[in-house]
């Protein structure tokens, strides 16, 4: 993951399939909310498994995808400013 001012990517779910996708299941942070490093931002669902996405650093969250959106692994789901 990235540092301050960077993007938060959808987790890598398959090293063997670069086109693997998952669903952004739940946001735990709201757009414009200030978060701390390690704070839970979202939960994503991949092949019946839920994966938590913590904040890689502190900052203000800018959401880039919505709940229920299908997202390719590695694609940005939020930005921290």
Image: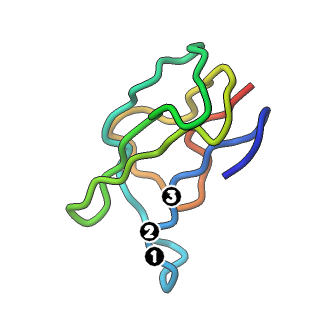
Query: In the picture, residue 46 is in which quadrant?
Result: bottom left
As helix, strand or loop, the secondary structure at mark 2 comes to loop
Any mark on residue 14, and which? 1
State the CA–CA distance, disc 1 to disc 3: 9 Å
Residue 69: horizontal and vertical position, in percent? 39, 42
How many C-alpha atoms fall within 10 Å of the one at disc 1: few (<14), some, or many (≥20)? few
Report the residue at 32% width, 39% height from top: 68
Which numbered dot is residue 11? 3
Mark 1, secondary structure of its residue: loop
The answer to whether mark 3 and mark 2 are in CB contact below 8 A is yes
Q: CA distance from mark 3 to mark 2?
A: 6 Å
Do residues under tags 2 and 1 come within 8 Å of each other at their CB atoms? yes
Please tell me which residue lies in front, 35 or 65. 35
Q: How is the image coloured?
A: rainbow
Q: How crowded is the residue under tag 3: few (<14 C-alpha within 10 Å), some, or many (20+)?
A: many
* Residue 20 pos. (x, y %): 44, 70
The image quarter containing residue 6 is top right
Answer left or right for 69 relative to 30: left
The part of the image, by quadrant, that contains residue 13 is: bottom left
Q: Which residue is mark 2?
A: 13
Q: Is residue 48 left or right of residue 32?
A: left
| Separation (CA) of disc 2 from disc 1 | 4 Å
């Amino acid at each position: 993951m990235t540092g301050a001012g960077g993007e938060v990517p959808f987790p890598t779910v398959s090293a063997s399939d670069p086109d693997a996708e998952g669903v952004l299941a739940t946001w735990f942070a709201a757009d414009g909310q200030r978060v701390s490093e390690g704070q839970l931002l979202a939960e994503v669902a991949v092949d019946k498994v839920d994966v938590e996405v913590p904040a890689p650093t502190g900052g203000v969250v800018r959401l880039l995808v919505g709940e229920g959106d299908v997202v390719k692994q590695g694609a940005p789901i939020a930005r921290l400013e």
